Image (cartoon, rainbow, N blue to C red):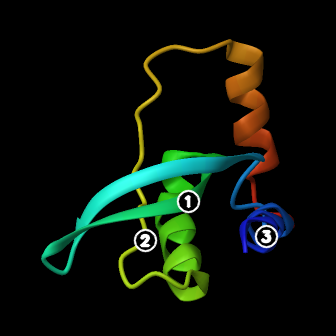
């Protein structure tokens, strides 16, 4: 699933890069009990303008009823890298 979502995001220019972080152990409340699951984190590099597309795609393709989808604001970063993200997520003509 992680590879499939990553490829869809990249092929559609919704993300410039996706890191797949495997073997994450998650403990969380779900339906009145504490669950313990092995999960995968996708660190998706995109722009603020593309966020809604990322969320929509994940909700459509993810097996969880409520997948974890959160965004972090980038306060600082290497300007050439940030420009690369912008360039790679531009819609093709």
| Image mark count | 3
Residue 83 percent coordinates (x, y): 72, 28
Q: As displayed, is residue 75 above or below residue 7?
A: above
Q: Nearer the viewer, residue 13 or 19?
A: 19
Mark with earlier residue (1, 2):
1
Instruction: Kindly tell me whether residue 52 is visible in this rendering.
Output: yes
* Horizontal relation, residue 65 to residue 81: left or right: left
Q: Residue at x 68, y 12 (%)?
A: 78
Q: Quadrant of residue 9?
A: bottom right
Q: Residue at x 74, y 52 (%)?
A: 89
Residue closest to the far left = 32
Q: Secondary structure at mark 2?
A: loop
Residue on which disc 3 sits:
12
Residue on which disc 1 sits:
38
Q: Classify mark 2: residues with Cα within 10 Å, few (<14), some (14-19) or many (20+).
A: few
Q: Residue at x 73, y 75 (%)?
A: 1
Q: CA distance from mark 3 to mark 2?
A: 21 Å
Residue on which disc 2 sits:
67
Q: Secondary structure at mark 1?
A: strand
Nearest to viewer (mark 1 / mark 2)? 1
Q: CA distance from mark 1 to mark 2?
A: 14 Å
Q: Residue at x 65, y 49 (%)?
A: 23
In the image, which disc is placed on residue 14? none
Mark with earlier residue (3, 2):
3
Q: As displayed, is residue 29 above or below residue 15?
A: below
* Horizontal relation, residue 48 to residue 9: left or right: left
Mark with earlier residue (3, 1):
3
């Amino acid at each position: 699933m992680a590879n499939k979502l990553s490829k869809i995001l990249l092929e559609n220019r919704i993300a410039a890069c996706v890191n797949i972080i495997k073997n994450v152990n998650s403990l969380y409340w779900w339906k009145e009990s504490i669950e313990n699951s092995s999960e995968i984190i996708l660190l998706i590099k995109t722009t603020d303008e593309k966020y809604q597309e990322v969320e929509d795609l994940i909700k459509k393709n993810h097996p969880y009823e409520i997948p974890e989808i959160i965004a972090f604001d980038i306060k600082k970063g290497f300007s050439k890298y940030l420009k690369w993200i912008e360039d790679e997520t531009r819609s093709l003509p």
